[in-house]
Amino acid sequence: MFMAGVENSRAARCGCKGIRSCLLCEDLNGKRRAEDEGHSVLHFKYEPSSGLAVRNEGGVHESFPFPGVLLWENFISEEEERDLINSMDQDAWKESQSGRKKQDFGPKVNFKKQRVHVGTFSGLPAVSRKIVLRMSQEPLLQGFHPVEQCNLDYSPQRGSAIDPHLDDSWLWGERLVTVNLLSDTVVTMSCDEGQREVRVCVSFPRRSLLVLHGQARHTWKHAIHRQDIRQRRVCSTFRELSPAFLPEGAYEALGSQLLDMALAFQGSPV
């Protein structure tokens, strides 16, 4: 009875479902992550200065253009980082998949059925107003008006990760914007090429901002692998609306309502 109680307690601290797993549930039920399985992978590294994906291995140099990535280093200061983390930690973190915890500021969405409604959404948090305004200094982010902010908390003790995926494009628009806090990490971009997988590792320094758009947004999956979380890492990802929710779109009225709520910056986590 005691051991069953211990197992239930540990399981309760894990938000993994289906094939997802973290160190807590792997230790409990023997799950293994797919990234641990060996398969043919070709590794490249992204060079922000050239915009190339580069590979130097065995005396062979290969590279190819890798568009759709913008890295803005030192986007926020150390003091701003402390303020952001202190503000986040005043709110509850919810257990999420693959060892992550999350706070979501956004509408309630069913992506499979393509349904969205306001739900308990009350806007983006007040602490984000200044950094969203700063984003507009970058020409690529002119006209970027986020309606969702998702905070994720990664921990090496939980084996946190996020599997390769493409973000939805029915509700969410062209640019995905992420601010990285507390520790450096690597965003791994991947694409299948015949019988092998091509990976491009994008270094993502602490306090930097990363934008994915174009091919990097729609063609290449992105992931954070477990081995690239060495200490606590928190990120905030901001998403804008797709054309269907903007003027002359099929859901223009709902989009306008969501934008007004989001950019009032009076929100709490949903």
Image (cartoon, rainbow, N blue to C red):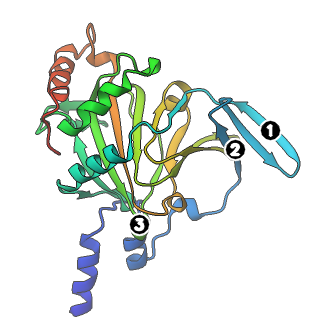
Q: Residue at x 37, y 21 (%)?
A: 136
Q: Which SS class for mark 2?
A: strand
Q: Is residue 45 left or right of residue 167?
A: right
What residue is shown with label 2?
44
Distance from the alpha carbon under mark 2 to that under mark 1: 9 Å
Q: Which mark is residue 22?
A: 3
Mark 2 or mark 1: whose residue is earlier in sequence = 2
Q: With respect to residue 141, does 81 lie above or below?
A: below
Circle nearer the viewer, 3 or 1: 1
Crowd rating for badge 3 (residues with CA inside 10 Å; few <14, some 14–19, many 20+): many
Q: Nearer the viewer, residue 25 or 205?
A: 205
Residue 157 is situated, as x and y percent measured from the top left of the image, at 41, 70
Estimate the spatial distance between the alpha carbons at disc 2 and disc 3, rounded to whole Å: 27 Å
Secondary structure of the residue carrying tag 1 is strand
Q: Residues within 10 Å of mark 2 (few under 14, many from 20)?
A: many
Which badge, 3 or 1, comes first in the chain's sequence? 3
In the rendered image, the quadrant that contains the C terminus is: top left
User: In which quadrant of the rendered view does residue 60 lie?
Assistant: top right
- Residue at mark 1: 62
